[in-house]
Image (spheres, rainbow, N blue to C red):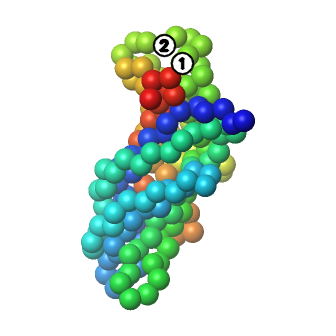
Amino acid sequence: MREQLGLLKVTVVQGKKLVIRDFRTSDPYVVVKLGNQTAKTKFINSCLNPVWNEELSFSLEEPVGVLSLEVFDKDRFKSDDKMGHAHLNLQPIASSARLKQFAKVSSAETILRKIVPDTDNCLARESSISCINGEVVQSVWLRLCAVKSGEIELKIKLIDPSVA
């Protein structure tokens, strides 16, 4: 039986410097996957720096997987164009949640871990995993792969199953 680690709430905040897929602009949306769970944002018309602020929910179980996302350009008359992809290893946030329980962290805001960009992740800049008012959260900018430019900002919150 798989151990339930909690509810993973992924807020797709915004995109920056996304690539042009139509003549002068794109109509981007994001598809987020965790294992066999999939969710997507609405598309934003004619925008290379979209703001979604959409919260998507996933069940996080052992073994902890990788959160993957793909950005697409919504097309009316043909299949949607790919605008890049990225991934985020969820092991650091899961282990930080365990650390929070073990250390009984309860102050207003405590940084539990920092993750730096490297060849094994798609981080565009350093990311911190924090405990804020009892919740484990991570703010992250992901660099899109297989395209000339583009970044996506996510805010990730892992909610303990005993609280959810």
Q: Of residues 44 and 144, which is closer to you in this image?
A: 44
Query: Total label count?
Result: 2
Residue 45 vs residue 159, the one in the foreground: 159
Mark closer to the chain start, 1 or 2: 1
Q: Is residue 44 above or below residue 20?
A: above
Q: What residue is pinned by disc 1?
A: 100
* Residue at left offset 37%, top offset 20%: 133
Q: Secondary structure at mark 1?
A: helix
Residue 129 in view in this figure: no
Residue type marked 1: Lys
Which residue appears at 37% of the width and 68% of the height? Answer: 28
Residue lying farthest to the right in this orientation? 1
- Other residues around mark 2 within 10 Å, as few (<14) / some (14–19) / many (≥20): some
Q: Nearer the viewer, residue 82 or 59?
A: 59
Q: Position of residue 76 (x, y in %)?
A: 35, 84
- Whole-percent x and y of residue 73? 40, 74
Q: Is 67 left or right of 21, judged from the image as shown? A: right
* Quadrant position of the C terminus in the picture: top left
Q: Nearer the viewer, residue 163 or 148?
A: 163
Measure how far apart labels 1 and 2 are at the Cα level: 5 Å
Tag shown at residue 35: none
Mark 2 secondary-structure assignment: loop
Q: Position of residue 15 (x, y in %)?
A: 37, 58
* Residue 132 visible, this orientation: yes
Residue located at (38% from left, 88% from top): 77
The quadrant holding residue 107 is top left
Label pair 1/2, CB-CB below 8 angstroms: yes
* Amino acid type, mark 2: Val
Q: Name the residue tied to disc 2.
A: 105
From this viewpoint, which residue is outermost toward the bottom? 77
